[in-house]
């Protein structure tokens, strides 16, 4: 729940205050550790990169699995 609240506050700030176009947002536990907190990664992406991000994969914990879910 905390990650969703944080995302809901940060994305509008990136758009309004920094003029970024936010095309994709992935929120969740992709890599965990014993440290508390969160991280934000921002990258410039073209259509090819966005297509690759949505490609089926067998990578553990990635939001799009090999079966498309």
Image (tube, rainbow, N blue to C red):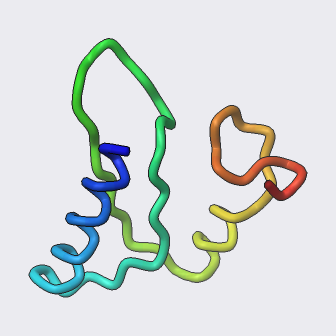
On-image quarter of the C terminus: bottom right
Left or right for 54, reference 47 = right
- The residue at 10%/81% (across/down) is 17
What x and y, as percent, mark residue 66?
A: 85, 48
- The residue at 34%/84% (across/down) is 21
Q: Note whether 57 is above or below 25 in the view shown.
A: above
Count of all numbered marks drawn on residues in the image: 0
Q: Nearer the viewer, residue 34 or 48?
A: 34
Q: Looking at the image, which residue sits at the far front?
A: 1
Left or right for 25, reference 4 = right
What x and y, as percent, mark residue 11?
A: 28, 70
What x and y, as percent, mark residue 13?
A: 16, 74
- The residue at 23%/82% (across/down) is 15
Left or right for 56, reference 54 = right
Name the quadrant containing residue 39.
top left
On-image quarter of the N terminus: top left
- The residue at 80%/39% (across/down) is 58
Q: Note whether 10 is above or below 23 in the view shown.
A: above
Q: Nearer the viewer, residue 40 or 52?
A: 40
Q: Note whether 29 is above or below 48 in the view shown.
A: above
Q: Looking at the image, which residue sits at the far left?
A: 17
Q: Looking at the image, which residue sits at the far right?
A: 67
What x and y, as percent, mark residue 3?
A: 34, 47
Name the quadrant containing residue 56.
bottom right
Left or right for 52, reference 17 = right
């Amino acid at each position: 729940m905390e990650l969703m609240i944080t995302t809901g506050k940060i994305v509008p700030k990136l758009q309004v205050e920094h003029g970024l176009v936010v095309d994709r947002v992935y929120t969740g536990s992709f890599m965990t550790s014993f440290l508390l907190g969160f991280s934000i990664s921002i990258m410039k992406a073209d259509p090819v990169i966005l297509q690759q991000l949505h490609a089926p994969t067998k990578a553990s914990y990635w939001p799009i699995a090999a079966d498309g879910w």
